[in-house]
Image (cartoon, grey):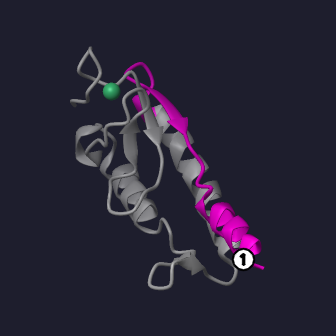
Amino acid sequence: MNCECITGTPATIRIDGDVGADPVWCHSCGSNLELEGVGLSDLLSSELDEWGQTYGEWIDWDHDKLRAGGIEMEEAFNQKGSGLASRVKKELVARFDVTFMPSTSARFYASMERREF
Ligand SMILES: [Zn+2]
């Protein structure tokens, strides 16, 4: 599995949802990694994939604003992600360190909207 670090391979994998990307990244250089290359079990890999695809459901992309209940949706996403990340950590123990980055975009959008008033 390749990234842009000098070693050519990640030391720490970051679980972090983003639009249109697999939710696994090299924590050092920020390269997006292919979920299939990480070496997870099929079950966890597909759960992680499904979870990643729900990223940003709290944002109305057409209108670039937060949906009603968006903060709670993001909170649920982060809780699920944190649970998945600890399972990833167990599966990849001795191969990679694993860290989880919670999403803050709903809070970001909420603060933007407050500023408009
Ligand atoms: Zn890297």
Is residue 65 a member of the stretch shown in magenta?
no
Badge 1: residue crowd in 10 Å (few <14, some 14–19, many ≥20): few
Residue 87 position in % (x across, y down): 51, 42
Describe residue 48's horizontal placement relative to residue 33 as left or right. Answer: right
Seen at 68% across and 84% down, the residue is 68
* The residue stretch that appears in magenta: 91-117
Label total for image: 1
Name the quadrant where ligand 1 sits: top left
Q: Nearer the viewer, residue 57 or 89?
A: 57
Seen at 45% across and 25% down, the residue is 93
Give the vertical position of 63 relative to 25 (above or below): below
Seen at 43% across and 57% down, the residue is 18
Give the vertical position of 24 relative to 3 (above or below): below
Describe residue 115's horizontal placement relative to residue 16 as left or right. Answer: right
Seen at 42% across and 26% down, the residue is 28
Residue 30 position in % (x across, y down): 38, 36
| Amino acid tagged 1 | Glu
Question: Can see residue 65?
Answer: yes
Give the vertical position of 104 relative to 89 (above or below): below
Residue 22 position in % (x across, y down): 33, 53
Q: Give the residue at mark 1.
A: 116
Residue 92 position in % (x across, y down): 41, 30
Q: Residue furthest top?
A: 7
Question: Can see residue 75?
Answer: no
Is residue 93 a member of the stretch shown in magenta?
yes
Q: Nearer the viewer, residue 114 or 22?
A: 114
